[in-house]
Amino acid sequence: MAAGKRYLVLGNGRAFEGFAFGADVAAVGEVVFATNMSGFAQGVTDPGFSGQLVVQTFPLVGNTGLDSAQIKSPAHLAGYIVREWCQSPSHHTCAGTLDAFLLERNIPGLWGVDTRALTKLIRSEGAMNGMITDDPARVDIEALKAYEAGDAVSRVSVKEPEQYSCQLSTALPSVVSASLNCQLKVVLWDFGRKQSTIDCLNSRGCDVLAVPHTWTAAQIRNENPDGIVLSGGPGNPALYTGIVNEITQLLDKGIPIFGIALGHQLLALANGGATEKLRYGHRGGCSVKEIATGRTLVTSQNHGYAVSMDRMPQNAKVSYVNANDHTCEGLDYTDFGGFSAQFAPEDCWTPHSEGNLFDRFIADMQRRAA
């Protein structure tokens, strides 16, 4: 276990002092905060955190430890910052500690930081670059401010196609499971997908082919899929012009398309919309209003960009909005029948929550195949 003082130095020159755990290395990235109160194992493995220094606002982290069933994806975050790190976790499934998890993956941790003050600073000044280091005097502030993570999608996407076979779930309500079979094929265009996305599709009767971000529209069409999912992922959507151009070539083919998180943003760009950087992003539990019903959903989110309300995609209507800042959280397309969500529908399973977006996608594919 690493020991001793460790610091977070921000691009504005402010330094926060704490103690070291995890890997004994320095790390640079965008400093963002996550507001989730549980599920830290899923959070640290979310590809959407690629290259970022994640501040956990909940004060105690790691008290339940980790078990292998929780770790379904590699860890891509650059560093992890908490107020209190539990060194003696207790849970009947615990098979490892947060410290060991970070150490094995060469990720530095920083604890003992005033995360409340740090979060308030990010909220007031916006997300900024930072560096976890044992020697704050040697940090080049100008170089830190100029740092850019670059093409984050290439770091998290699969390198070769991966096949995931259908496994129908007995946990789904009978009204959903009665109409399912294992005859649907989905291409998951991987920009940083989560295993839970694949699980949701497999459990609803879909064979899933996860393909690299470098694939073309022609390659995807050659697979003859019943539907296409544009996965979530990290980074600035405006950087991925090549992917956007490929998506535009699929819009008139009659294939159902479902965009999630980054996929939602890329689909909007392919339809003439624009995206914008949020001041400090949405990471954790967020309230979302469903326009059609007026109901409010509590969703899981992890993004720093949003589809601009000032330049909406062509032939699209807003289906969900954020209940706090009124940013776009979902779109329905009237010309080619696709739809998208900014939040993470794969984190919910009941038919009366946002998980029903997967059921909607299944229904779209079944209608096309009929």
Image (cartoon, rainbow, N blue to C red):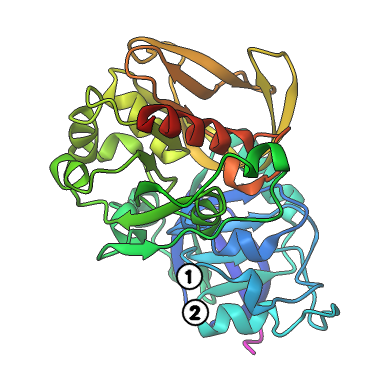
Q: Position of residue 30 (x, y in %)?
A: 47, 52
Q: Residue, x 32% and y 11% (percent of image)?
A: 314
User: Is residue 69 a member of the stretch shown in magenta?
Assistant: no
Q: Residue at x 42, y 62 (%)?
A: 164
For the N terminus, the quadrant is bottom right
> In the image, is residue 63 above or below residue 279?
below
Disc 2, SS? loop
Q: Is residue 254 above or below residue 188?
A: above
Q: How many marks?
A: 2
Q: Residue at x 68, y 62 (%)?
A: 40
* Kind of residue at badge 1: Pro
User: Which x, y percent locates residue 339?
Assistant: 44, 25
Give the residue at mark 2. 105
Foreground residue among 259 and 154 = 259
Give the residues in magenta: 1-5
Residue under numbered circle 1: 74
Give the x, y percent position of residue 207. 41, 55
Q: Relative to residue 245, is residue 28 depicted above or below? A: below
- Is label 2 or label 1 in front? 1
Secondary structure, mark 1, is loop
Residue situated in front as seen by the camera: 52 or 210 = 210
Q: CA distance from mark 2 to mark 1?
A: 9 Å
Amino acid under disc 2:
Arg
Report the side of 79 relative to 172 (left or right): left
Nearer-the-camera pick, 156 or 236 = 156
321 up-or-down from 39: above or below: above
Q: Main secondary structure of the magenta part?
A: loop
